[in-house]
């Protein structure tokens, strides 16, 4: 049976698009059973519809807190029996109860080298603004497993992106996004191939059948 993937989004959905394209190209084999957006206007919904993936809108603003929102999300997802939940530009925080229900099966992408510029309040362009204001010479992308707490889970993949002297939020975010797309696809492919092994907080990538860690 194919793995069932649910993707949670809030915005443009370029990471969702990269995942859809990778699946279509045969990089991994899985079924996108649902895309849920926390915002009705998210362009990601259009991307999902175009790919023939069922969509749902669960507006974050209709709920008073993370806990009640996550409860509604749990009920929405239950019938889909997801094997893997991918946060792709999802700007809401999931409750501990939600994370426990799907522990080890939720991934997120974050546009910095965690633990820099992450945690509550650091999302989207704010991350790049903070990196530029701080003056770091290197930023990057991180793909993590989601644990209780914001951006605290084990790191699956990371890659550095140099900050250039004339970078602004737009240029830096575009370069980081391109790396996120590549890393997210690889993280999902490794997970589905059963090649991600958790040792404490460390995620070990086990060799492929051909014996190579990098393919
Ligand atoms: C991505 O850069 C993602 O890492 C970030 O939002 C952007 C969404 O882009 N997520 C966070 O900051 C989460 N803390 P997309 O909608 O085009 O995929």
Image (tube, rainbow, N blue to C red):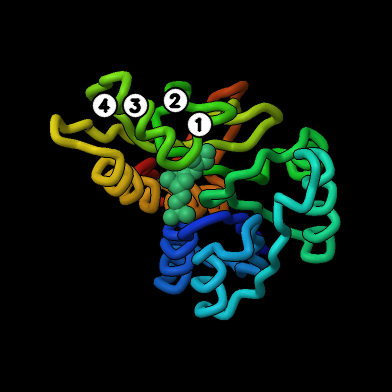
Residue 149 in percent (x, y) is at: 67, 27
Q: Residue 4, located in which quarter of the rendered image?
A: bottom right
Left of 83 or right of it: where is 156?
Answer: left
Vertical side of 110 occupied by 52: above or below: below
What residue is disc 1 on? 122
In contact (CB < 8 Å): disc 2 and disc 3: yes
Vertical side of 176 occupied by 116: above or below: above
What residue is disc 3 on? 131
Residue displayed at 62% across by 55% down: 8
For the N terminus, the quadrant is: bottom right
Residue 5 appears anywhere in the view: no
In contact (CB < 8 Å): disc 1 and disc 2: yes
Q: Nearer the viewer, residue 61 or 55?
A: 61
Pointer 3: residues within 10 angstroms few (<14), some, or many (20+)?
many
Q: Residue 52, located in which quarter of the rendered image?
A: bottom right
Residue displayed at 43% across by 22% down: 116
Instruction: Indicate the secondary structure of the residue bearing disc 2.
Output: loop
What residue is disc 4 on? 138
Instruction: Indicate the secondary structure of the residue bearing disc 4.
Output: strand
Of callouts 4 and 2, the N-terminal one: 2
Of callouts 1 and 4, the N-terminal one: 1
- Whole-Å distance between the Cαs marked 4 and 2? 12 Å
- Whole-Å distance between the Cαs marked 1 and 4? 17 Å
Residue displayed at 20% across by 37% down: 167
Residue 111 in percent (x, y) is at: 41, 38
Pointer 4: residues within 10 angstroms few (<14), some, or many (20+)?
some
What residue is disc 2 on? 117
Instruction: Indicate the secondary structure of the residue bearing disc 3.
Output: helix
Left of 57 or right of it: where is 172?
Answer: left
- Whole-Å distance between the Cαs marked 2 and 3? 7 Å
Residue 170 appears anywhere in the view: yes
Residue displayed at 71% across by 50% down: 61
């Amino acid at each position: 049976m194919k793995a069932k993937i649910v993707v949670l989004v809030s915005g443009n959905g370029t990471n969702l698009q990269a995942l859809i394209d990778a699946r279509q190209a045969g990089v991994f084999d899985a079924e996108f059973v649902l895309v849920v957006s926390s915002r009705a206007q998210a362009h990601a919904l259009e991307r999902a519809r175009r790919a023939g993936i069922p969509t749902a809108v669960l507006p974050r603003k209709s709920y008073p807190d993370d806990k009640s929102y996550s409860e509604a999300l749990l009920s929405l997802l239950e019938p889909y029996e997801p094997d893997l939940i991918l946060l792709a530009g999802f700007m809401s925080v999931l409750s501990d109860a939600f994370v426990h229900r799907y522990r080890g099966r939720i991934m997120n992408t974050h546009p910095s080298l965690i633990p820099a510029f992450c945690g509550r309040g650091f999302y989207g362009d704010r991350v790049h603004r903070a990196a530029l204001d701080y003056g770091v010479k290197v930023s990057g992308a991180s793909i993590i497993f989601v644990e209780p707490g914001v951006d605290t889970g084990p790191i699956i993949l990371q890659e550095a992106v140099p900050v250039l002297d004339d970078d602004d939020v737009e240029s830096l975010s575009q370069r980081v996004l391109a790396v996120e797309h590549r890393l997210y696809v690889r993280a999902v492919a490794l997970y589905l191939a059963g090649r991600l092994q958790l040792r404490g907080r460390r995620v070990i990538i086990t060799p492929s059948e051909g014996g190579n860690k990098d393919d």
